[in-house]
Image (cartoon, helix red, strand yellow):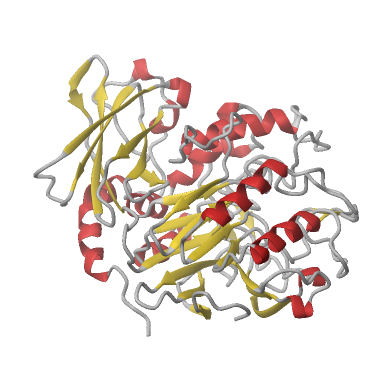
Amino acid sequence: MEKAHGTGQAFGRRAVLRSSLAVAGAAALPPLAAAAPAQALSGRPSADWGVQAGDVTTSSGLVWVRSDRRARMVVETSATESFRTVRRWTGPLVGPETDFTGRTALRGLPPGEEIHYRVLLADPDDPRRTGRPVYGTFRTAPALRKDVRFVWSGDLAGQGWGINPDRGGYRIFEQMRRLDPDFFLCSGDNVYADNPIAPSVVLPDGSTWRNVTTEEKSKVAETLAEFRGAFRYNLLDANLRRFNAQVPTVVQWDDHEVHNNWYPGQILDDARYAEKRVDVLSARSLRAFTEYFPVSTHRPDADADGRVYRVLRHGPLLDVFVLDMRTYRNANSPGRQPDDSQGILGARQLRWLKRELSRSRAVWKVIAADMPLGLVVTDGPVNFEAVAQGDPGAPLGRELQIAELLRHIKHQRITGTVWLTADVHYTSAQHYDPARAAFKDFAPFWEFVSGPLNAGGFPAVKLDGTFGPEQPFVRAPATANVPPGQGSQFFGEVAIDAEGGELTVRLRDEDGAVLFTKVLQPGRVGQ
C-alpha cells in the first residue's frame, strides 16, 4: 500500500517558502538581474534567482545563491519556520569571478530533520545593509531507517523548446514538487548549450510556440559568459525556482552541457562554432556548471580534475552513485574493439565505482548513469554514443567495461543495485537477465529511464541483446522532436519503505499520472 510520504510536513515547507514565492511570481526576472555592473546599482543586494540546496547528507548540505552585485553571502538555519532560534553561517564574498554566485557548506546538522534556511546578501562595505532574505528548506538524510522518496529526470530546454509562458513555463517541476521528495536527481543535460532558444517556433499545426529568451541563449555557447548564460536561463522559470527552494538536487552532467555527443579531444565539425576544441569548451562549461549548482568541488575524495562523479549516502536504506559517462570516455566509434580499458567511464572511475559499491552497506544502491546500458544510441551512420552498439553477441567496445562491472557486482555479492538514467527523451523499464544474454556472468537487475523535463520527445530506440534486456514498458512518441505538452515529457519517482525495505519505482508523465509501477524486494535476485 502506498504511503503519503511527507504529507505532514508539506504544508509547513510550503509556508516557509512564501518569501521565495514572492520572488518567483513572474516567469522571467527583470533584465537588470542578469548582468548589471555592481557599481551601477543602488539599494541593497538582491537574490532574485532564488536559492538551491544540494548534495545533502545526514549532517550537511550545500546552499547556493546568486546576487545582483558584490555581496557577502550569509545563511541562517533554524529548526522551525519561525526562525526564533537561528544558527548563522558566514559564506563567501561573491563577485564577478564566480558570476556573482556563491555556495555555503552547512555542517553539523541533525540527521533526518527538516532544515529551514534563509539566505541574506550583505553589502561588503556595510554588513548591516542586507537585502530581503530568500527562504528554503531541505531534509537531512536519516541516520536510522526512515521512508525515502526522490524523483529523477533529465534534459531541460532542448531542441529549442524553452520557457513558454503560454503553458506556464516548466510545469513538470510543480508536479515533482507536490510529491515533496527528499531530493531530485537530475541525470544530465541540465542545459542545452548547443541549442539556441528562438523567440518563437511555428508548430506543424500552424500555431506558434513562444519562448522566453536571452542574449546568451540566442546562439551556441562558446565563451564562459555564454555558458554562464545557458545555466542561468533555466532559473528564469518560476516553477523551477520554487522547486529549488523546497527540493535539494543531486546533479550530474552529460553532452549538451557542452555539445551534442562530445568526447574528450574532439575537434568539432560545426560551422556555428569559432572555437572548435571540445576540451576548451568543456572546461568553460564545467566552470559554469560548478558555479550554478550546489555541487561540492572540494570533497576529500575528489581528484585534482574537479570531478563530477561521487557517492551520496542517504541513510541506511540508500546510496546514490553519481556517474560521469562523458568526461573520461573514449571517442565514439563503431564499438567493436575486443579490448577497451578506457570505455565510457575511464579506468580510474571504474575502479572507484567497484570499490565504493563493495564498501556500501545500504540496502539499495542506485547507480545514476547519464546514459542507458542496453539501448542503442547512435552517433551518425556508423558510430555509437552510449554503451550498446547493436551487436547482440559477446561484449565489445564499451560493453567490455560494463561487463567487468557487472561481473564484479555478482562475484562480490553486492545486492540491491538499480540503474536510473534519462538521455533518450522517453520513458521505459528494462530488466537485464543472464538467461537471455550473450554475456552471462552477472546477476539480474533493472534499469529505468525517464525524461525529458522540457525538451523534444523522440521515438524509442532498439535494444541490444548482449546483457539480455527485456522491456516490459515503454512510452515514447511516434515521431521525432515532439514539443512539450503533447504527451512527451516524463519523470520518475522512487520510494523506499522503511519497514519492509521495498523499493517502488513509478514512471510518471508531465501531469504526474503514473504510467508504470515496479516494486522490488530487498535482497532478492532475479526479480
Q: How many marks?
A: 0
Residue 60 is situated, as x and y percent measured from the top left of the image, at: 33, 44
Foreground residue among 243 and 247: 247
Q: Residue furthest bottom?
A: 1
Q: Quadrant of residue 258?
A: top right
Q: Is 518 placed above or below 108 here? A: below
**Viewed as shown, does residue 307 lie left or right of 298?**
right
Quarter of the picture containing the C terminus is bottom right
Residue 296 is situated, as x and y percent measured from the top left of the image, at: 46, 37
Quarter of the picture containing the N terminus is bottom left
Q: Is 228 placed above or below 452 here? A: above
Q: Residue furthest front?
A: 412
Residue 507 is situated, as x and y percent measured from the top left of the image, at: 53, 73
**Viewed as shown, does residue 173 lie left or right of 77?**
right
**Viewed as shown, does residue 490 lie left or right of 123?**
right
**Viewed as shown, does residue 13 lie left or right of 300?**
left
Is any part of residue 210 visible from this angle? Answer: no
Is any part of residue 506 visible from this angle? Answer: yes
Foreground residue among 49 and 449: 449
Query: For the point 21% across and 53% down, which residue is it?
Result: 16
Foreground residue among 504 and 131: 504
Q: Quadrant of residue 35?
A: top left
Query: For the point 75% across and 37% down, which residue is it?
Result: 264
Q: Is 105 placed above or below 490 here? A: above
Query: For the point 68% across and 59% down, which residue is it?
Result: 408
Residue 525 is situated, as x and y percent measured from the top left of the image, at: 60, 77
